Image: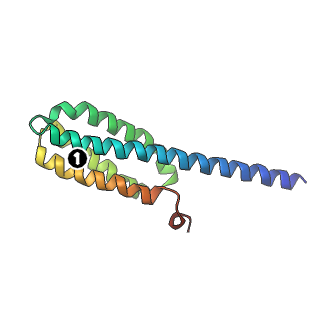
Amino acid sequence: MTRRIALIVILVFLVTLGTYEIIAVNMFLDHMEKAVDQLQTEITLHQDDLTVLVEYVNQEKAYWEKREKNLNLMFNHKDLKNVCDTMNRVQTYIAQNDYENALVEMNVLVETVHELRSVMCFNYDNIL
């Protein structure tokens, strides 16, 4: 009887943890996809002076770094490292007011963030 209760408690814990992971990852990915799409639009609008976007990029980078620590517990660091590296380059190019390189790196960042959904979300390939 106690084994069944322990098994049920463990099962409930795992289901709760899995549900939390699905919800947290989806919320995080939704935020990041909206943020990089917005930043891509802002870069094209502020071609002449990208330095007005420095604070916004710093906020999104801080958001990423805060969440990345928790995500590294669940996902391979190699999958997440590309986003961090690309975000660092975007931040540098925007601070230097280098429109062409910032736009190229921003396009790479958009694609990288959108590809994270297939790596991080709940699907049959990730289960297997």
Q: Give the residue drawn at x 77%, y 49%.
A: 9
Question: Is disc 1 surrounded by few (<14), some (14 to 19) or many (20+) residues within 10 Å?
Answer: some
**Residue most toward the right?**
1
| Residue 36 image point, x, y percent | 30, 44
Q: Give the residue drawn at x 52%, y 62%.
A: 123
Q: Which residue was labeled with disc 1? A: 89
Q: Is residue 98 left or right of residue 71?
A: left
Q: Give the residue drawn at x 23%, y 49%.
A: 106
Q: Can you say whether 102 is above or below 122 in the image? A: above
| Residue 43 image point, x, y percent | 18, 41
- To which quarter of the image does residue 54 belong? top left
Q: Can you say whether 30 is above or below 4 in the image? A: above
Q: Secondary structure at mark 1?
A: helix
Nearer to the camera, 92 or 30: 30
- To which quarter of the image does residue 63 belong? top left
Nearer to the camera, 91 or 48: 48
The colour scheme is rainbow
Q: Give the residue drawn at x 73%, y 53%.
A: 11
Q: Is residue 126 left or right of residue 32?
A: right
- Quadrant where the C terminus sits is bottom right
| Residue 104 image point, x, y percent | 18, 52
Type of the residue with mark 1: Arg
- Quadrant where the N terminus sits is bottom right
| Residue 20 image point, x, y percent | 58, 45
Nearer to the camera, 48 or 75: 48
**Residue most toward the left?**
48
Q: Can you say whether 64 is above or below 110 in the image? A: above
Q: Is residue 32 left or right of residue 3?
A: left
Count of marks placed on residues: 1
